Every structure is written in structure tokens, then in C-alpha cells.
Image: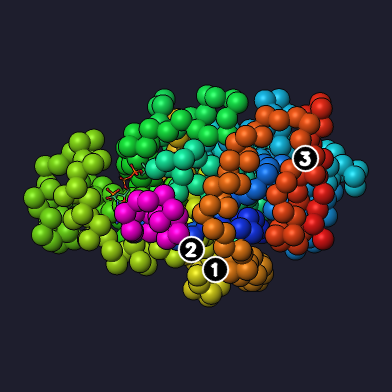
Amino acid sequence: MSTKVQNVGILAMELYFPSQYVDQVDLEKFDEVGTGKYTIGLGQSKMGFCSDREDINSICMTALHRLIEKNNINLHDIGRLEVGTETIIDKSKSVKTFLMTLFAKEGATDIEGIDSTNACYGGTAALFNSINWVESSSWDGRKAIVVAGDIAVYGKGPARPTGGAGAVAMLIGPDAPLVFDCGVRASYMTHAYDFYKPDLASEFPYVDGKLSIKCYLSALDNCYNLFCKKMRKDNPDFKGLLSLDGMLFHSPYCKLVQKSLGRVCFNDFLNASPADREKQFPGLSQFNNHKREETYFDRDVEKAFMIYSEKLFNEKTKPSLHVAKNVGNMYTPSLYGGLVSYLVSKSPDQLIGKKFALFSYGSGLASTMYSISICKDMSAGSKLERLINSLNNTIAMLDKRQCVDPQVFSDLMDVRTKNYHTAPYEPSGSIDVLFPGTYYLVRIDEQRRRTYERKL
Ligand code: ACO
């Protein structure tokens, strides 16, 4: 392919979340914590979870198959399939190879790509690989699919209400309605033990909660400032948040996202000239000499900039939190659940020509801020309308889920934990409760080979 392709980005999307959830108000009572701790303190409403009937292969397959069906994708038109996940059930065999069962039965096996892993960042890495492939000399004219999925579970304790589960599948190619801006991706990667999974016999991570928040916010500072610098190369008038129509974040829990938007404003404040500070940030001069690295847990800075940013948050970020608030942290798909929420909150007319930034964070740590522009082109407009209509149908399924008592949720978590390494194994979780079209685990045999079926 010699001609450079234009407008590479997301052509279609599909989101999968489990059919069962636990209400965070009920969970507060069950865990005997103060009323409001999970709902107000963390900003969460509901938490999706899977029984032992679902695993990483099945949830990724459910999202992928739905994307293919809804968009009538010809499997031979796909030249790359990438997976991002941190839910590891096999130290060698990738989830991507399991997803190939769908393609291989149609004889479509010439498909590059494999899994990417680093906490919640793997989906973004997989996405960048696919975008890069379409823009590269290796591209053969076909499209790519990216699947990001995770089952986010924590042991009993303060981290448990920040769990969740889900998968997203995205069709990538040229002439897309959601275009990835070139040359402005800003990354920050370093070493930290904030959240990691060194115990391969357990599904649960080791988490240093406070350190993870500090790492997240410092990664945000670094990515945001570098992103602004790169944006200003082509557009010297770029004014950070004020020049963007939306700002979307990886969402471990919604309160951290609201604090993050305040943090972005604090960065804009520190970067402003003295004259601009007076004009744009009246009444905040007591923070003139504060330093980024000393303020991650400074209550005064946090409160002042959350108040300052409230209107901006409601306008540019809150619309992206619907899935995060109602499903929880899905890990790798979290940011893309944010993108889905943001898109369905507007009509195509309201979105055309808009630009928004996305912040992807994975503990350990890997992070990037990048931006997406909504294409103004007419044909992209109709693709955007199709994309939003299809996502509206998906989002409506949030209200069709079954609410489960926290005791039932806790018992199902115990079953998962107890049997995490059992083989042979026959799952006991209900098949009836699953949404039609959901893949589920039928058995694990003596050789730990897994068999699945799809609910009709
Ligand atoms: N009413 C209202 N708010 C309350 C109440 C109440 N009754 N009780 C507590 N709160 C508030 C607290 O003041 C606190 O708010 P703040 O953050 O503004 O200070 C908030 O609820 C949480 O309470 P804490 O006591 O600080 O939290 P705790 O120690 O129980 O744990 C944490 C919270 C660290 C987020 C934990 O859930 C965790 O470890 N989660 C997993 C790690 C995580 O998600 N990290 C984020 C980035 S990394 C990633 O994406 C995995």
C-alpha cells in the first residue's frame, strides 16, 4: 500500500458487561462501613460481576461476536486481532488464540496480533498497535479488531467495592468517524509497586491503595503537561482543557476521575502566566507557590480545584462516567466504557468536529494521554450515527441486569476463589441469568483445557 491512509480510528464498537450486579448501597450495609462510603466517597452506584460461568476468554468472545454480528463484518476482511487484558488464565496461550476459533472455522487464519498486558493499560497498547499497523507499510488494506477485557475482583476489604468486569471490542480502520490525532500521544512509564499480581495462584492483586492513587495522579500530571506541549507544536493557541470538548479518564472509581479533572485544572493554573492566573483562576492565589509533587494528598488544593472545575467536570467529563458508575472498574475496557458513555450522551450533530483527550493508566506503571477528533466528513457522519445507535442498544441493557444480594455476590466470589485452580472443574453459576448471545464456560478438563458454549 503506497498511498497514506487518512483518518485512521474507530469504525465500530461493542461493549459487554455482566448481567448481574450488586448495589453499592446494599454493599455498604453488608460490609458495615459508613453510609455513603462507596456511593459518595467513591462515587459508585453498582458493580457488575461474573460467576464462575464466565472467564476472560468467554467475555472477550461475547464482545467480539456481538461486534461482528451487529456490523456484518466479513471475517476475511480482518487482518489484525489484538487483545488487551490483565486477567491471565494461561501463562503461554493468549486470549487472542481462543478468539481465533471464530475466524478459523471460516478459514480466516491470516490474522496478526497477540495479547498485551500491563494492568489497565493493555487495551490502549493493543489499540495503538492496531492504529500503527493500519498507518504502516505492513498494512495490507484490511481492518483490525481490538478486544479489551477483564474481570476485576479484589479480596474482602476496602478495595472490593472498586471491582467490576466487562469487555469492549473495536473495529479499526481508515475513514473512521473517531479519528486518532497524530503526533500528540504523550506517555509516562516508570516502575512502581502500586498494584500488581505476583501470586499466580490467586485472582486477586496486591494493592497499595494510597500509592496507586498517587501514581495515577502523578502519571496524569506528566502525561497532561507533555500532551499540551505536543498539541502546542501545531497549534500555539492550544489552551489545555479549555481547548478540548471533553476529557475522559481510566476510571478505577468515579470520585478519582472527578478529582483528576480538578488536578488538570491545577496543572493549567500552575502553567498559566501571573496575569492569566488572576483572570482565569480568581481567588486561588494562595496556591501560587504550591508544587505538583507535594500536593497529591493536599486537601486544600484538591477541594479548591474540585470546586473550581465543577462546571467543567459536568460538561466535559461527567457524561463519560455512566458505565463506570454502573459497572465499576472494568480495568482495560474502563477508558473505552468511558468513550461509549460519552458518545451515547450526545447526538451525532453535537459530536461532529469535536475533540477530546483520553487518559489511560495501568498500574506498575504505564500511562498515555492521547486525543480523538470526530470527523466532519459526511460519510463519517453516517458511520457515527450507526455507531451511536448500536451503542444505545447496548447501554439500554444496563437496566435489564439482575440485582443480586451482597451475600449472594460474596458467596459467588468465594466459589471463584476456592476453585481458581481446580481441574477438572464444572462451573455451578447460572446459565439462565446470562444475556442471550453470552459465551460461557462449560467445563475445564484434566488437562485444563476449557470448553465453551454460547447462550442462544
Ligand atoms: N460517606 C462519604 N464518604 C466517605 C464515607 C462516608 N460514610 N466514609 C469514607 N468516605 C470517603 C473518604 O473520605 C474517602 O474520600 P477521599 O478519597 O476524598 O478522602 C473515600 O470515601 C474512600 O475512603 P478511604 O477510607 O480513603 O478509602 P479506603 O482506604 O477504604 O480505600 C481505595 C479506597 C484506596 C480506593 C481502595 O478502594 C482501593 O485500594 N481500591 C483499589 C485501588 C484503586 O482503584 N486505585 C486507583 C488507581 S489504580 C487502578 O486503576 C486499579
Would residue 380 be found to the left or right of residue 40 on screen?
right
Residue type at mark 1?
Val
- Residue wearing tag 1: 344
**In this view, which residue lies farthest toward the left?**
286
Quadrant holding the N terminus: top right
| In the rendered image, the vertical position of residue 238 relative to residue 194, given as above or below | below
| In the rendered image, the vertical position of residue 344 relative to residue 123, given as above or below | below
Residue displayed at 72% across by 54% down: 430
Give the numbered dot on residue 229.
none
Bin the neighbour count of mark 3 within 10 Å (Cα to Cα): few under 14, some 14-19, many 20 and up: some
| In the rendered image, the vertical position of residue 112 relative to residue 145, given as above or below | above
Element carrying mark 1: helix
* Part of the protein shown in magenta: 24-39
| Depth order, front residue of 147/78 | 147
Residue displayed at 18% across by 61% down: 280
Q: Are marks 1 and 2 in contact (CB under 8 Å)?
A: yes
- Residue wearing tag 2: 322
Residue displayed at 67% across by 29% down: 421
CA separation, marks 3 and 1?
A: 39 Å
Does the stretch in magenta take in 101? no
Residue displayed at 16% across by 49% down: 300
Residue type at mark 3?
Glu
Residue type at mark 2?
His
Q: Is residue 71 visible?
A: no
Quadrant holding the C terminus: bottom right
Q: Are marks 2 and 3 in contact (CB under 8 Å)?
A: no
Bin the neighbour count of mark 2 within 10 Å (Cα to Cα): few under 14, some 14-19, many 20 and up: many
- Residue wearing tag 3: 426
Who comes first in sequence, dot 3 or dot 1?
1
